[in-house]
Amino acid sequence: MNALVNMAAEVPENPLVPPIPELVIGLIAFFIVFGFLAKKLLPNINKVLDERRKQIEGRIEDAEATQAEAQQVLADYRAQLADARHEAARLRQEAQEQGATLIAEMRAEGQRQREEIIAAGHAQIEADRKQAAHSLRQDVGKLATELAGKLVGESLEDVARQSRTIDRFLDEIEAQAASDATKAEAGR
């Protein structure tokens, strides 16, 4: 044994190569620890990893569903916005048409009222003219009768004759005035 010890002492030990008994004990301990880890810890680690993977996949699916829902809501919103714009344009158009109709009606009503006022004015003027003509006839008749009575020296009291004479005289004056007006218009 001495020889063995001497041999062992003679061969220099390589620091990179461990002694064989240590290597065997180290390998046995490694396999025991590896077996323990494989039996006890590896299923727990795989379980946690599977849960995380499922959780991540679930979140991805939720995110995709939420994104699809958001896209649908956006599409609905855009459709509603387009409908609202079309409705607003339609209402604006109707309001413009109603405004134009209302303006036309108001103009027609104003025109009608103006024509009524003008017709009423003409009727009033005509009535006033007839009243003035009648009053003038009476006054002219009285004055003419009085003047004729003073010239003749007698009273001319026959009312029927007075009326006929006055009416004939005034009719001749009116006819002459109308013929003068017609000549004046023809000369223009």
Image (cartoon, helix red, strand yellow):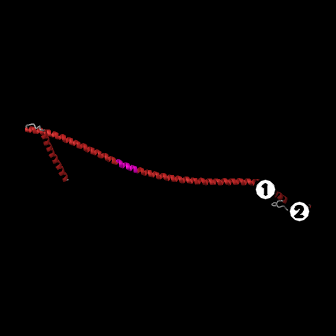
Dividing the picture into quadrants, the one containing residue 71 is bottom right
Name the amino acid, label 2. Met
Helix, strand or loop under label 2: helix
Position above or below: 42 against 110? below
Asked if the stretch drawn in magenta spans residue 59, the answer is no
Position of the N terminus by quadrant: bottom right
Name the amino acid, label 1. Gly
Q: Which residue is identified by label 1?
A: 35
Q: In the image, what residue occupies the spot 70% across and 54% down?
A: 50
Within-10-Å neighbours for mark 2: few <14, some 14–19, many 20+: few
Main SS category, magenta section? helix
Q: Which mark, by number, is residue 7?
A: 2
Q: In the image, what residue occupies the spot 35% across and 48% down?
A: 105
Please state the extent of the stretch shown in magenta in the rendering. 97-106
Query: Is 115 on the left or on the right of 76, as rendered?
Result: left
Q: Which mark, by number, is residue 144?
A: none
Q: In the image, what residue occupies the spot 16% across and 47% down?
A: 175
Image coordinates for residue 131, horizontal then vertical, percent: 21, 41
Image coordinates for residue 123, horizontal then vertical, percent: 25, 44
Within-10-Å neighbours for mark 1: few <14, some 14–19, many 20+: few
The one of 34 and 96 positioned closer to us in this rendering: 96
Helix, strand or loop under label 1: helix
Q: Residue furthest front?
A: 160
Distance, label 1 to label 2, CA atoms, is: 38 Å
